[in-house]
Amino acid sequence: MVEATKNSPSIFSQMSQLAQEHSAINLAQGFPNMPIDPRLKECITAAVQSENHQYSPYQGIPALREEISILIQRTSGIAINPQEILVTAGATQGIFTTVQSLVGKGDEVILLDPCYDCYDLPVVLVGAKPVHVPLNEDYLPDWDCIEAAITQKTRLIVINSPHNPSGRVWEKKEYLELERILSKYSNLNILSDEVYEYLAFDRPHYSVRNSAFLRERSVVMASFGKSLQATGWKMGYLTAPEALMNRILQVHQFLVFSVNSFVQRGISDYLPEFSAEEVNRDYRSRRALFCSGLEKSKFRLLPCEGTYFQTVDYSQISEQNDVDFAIQLTKEAGVASIPFSVFNQDRRDLKHLRFCFAKMEQTLIEATERLCKI
Ligand SMILES: Cc1ncc(COP(=O)(O)O)c(C=O)c1O
């Protein structure tokens, strides 16, 4: 049960609203302002015209699950049976459903802070306890701390690489640590949020699916909102081995049954033309534009190895806390960002802000010009 206090909008909605009120450039909320691929629009339009308007099979239409399986094989070389794929109403629903299916009252779930803000609530709502373990100051996992937080009640560890908000991308050695830990706890599974899988820049994306051992114990979350740059459609999918999928399907079929029929059809017709390399190249050049635009600023850029978020350190500019500084930056400099402390349960403030560079070139140029004036 959620408490009957006044609902407060998430920091993303708050900063977006502030940006609107002050006519600021919105680099806060993570959505692209570029047009989507016209071919994708054509596929969706054709799907609307050809009567795809009734309930579809609840696991997702077979054609789409087949195309997702081919896409995973094409981009990672890993064979996933369409039976191990579930089409979801965005990654958020997949995450919620996974927690509801695999976690129960009194259980514990490890979340690594700073973390995306939709992980906590589903854990609380099933009567389980979110155990927040901080990443280290480089935003990478501290395996000693993680292991120390595991108890006999721990059912799930939620991981996320490429990582929102920091932009770090985990190397293979992190997954070897996970293997070591999971081999000690047979009741423990992984929820791997890989929604930015195509946006790894400085090293290839490593999926939990790359490890045969971890794959049998993991649910992997993907989002078409991120990969097709259509966040408003709320479409995604998860992969899970049969034993976990059977549990997830029991919840999914009564939570949403099936997701939007014509969008499923349209995406399935489009996927053979989709190029993950092109998406990666495109964001790589936006990252380069944004970073070169900030070269002469007083902000210090932290490593952005993936995602479409650039983290900056503003400690040379101000001693203000990050929330106040982000508000001031929106009002006075006209650029909205997200302060990092909101992603930490303990509100730890390292004077870091997150800027989204999934924006048109002109937007990025204008934003960096404004930021250089600080
Ligand atoms: C790490 C992470 N996971 C999940 C989501 C949610 O994705 P969707 O919009 O497909 O629900 C987001 C969206 O920003 C995200 O950044």
Image (cartoon, helix red, strand yellow):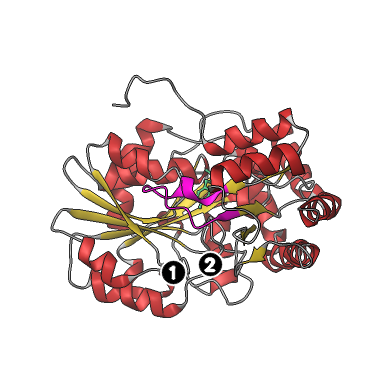
Q: In the depicted view, which residue is nearer to us: 349 or 41?
A: 349
Q: In the depicted view, which residue is nearer to us: 244 or 117?
A: 117
Rendered view: 304 above or below 126: below
Q: Mark 2 — residue? A: 168
Q: In the depicted view, which residue is nearer to us: 65 or 208?
A: 208
Cβ at disc 1 under 8 Å from ligand 1: no
**Mark 2–mark 1 CB contact (< 8 Å):** yes
Whole-Å distance between the Cαs marked 2 and 1?
7 Å
Which quarter of the image is occupied by the N terminus?
Answer: top left
Amino acid type indicated by mark 1: Leu
Residue 338 showing in the rendered view: yes
First in residue order: circle 2 vs circle 1: 1
Q: Which residues lie in the magenta part?
A: 339-353
- So how many labels did they put on this image? 2
Rendered location of residue 154, percent (x, y)? 20, 55
Residue visible at 54% across and 38% down? 11
| Label 1, residues with CA under 10 Å away: few <14, some 14-19, many ≥20 | some
Rendered view: 285 above or below 267: below
Label 1 SS: loop
Rendered location of residue 310, percent (x, y)? 64, 60
Quadrant in the picture for residue 190 = bottom left
Q: Mark 1 — residue? A: 140
Quadrant in the picture for residue 274 = bottom right
| Label 2, residues with CA under 10 Å away: few <14, some 14-19, many ≥20 | many
Label 2 SS: loop
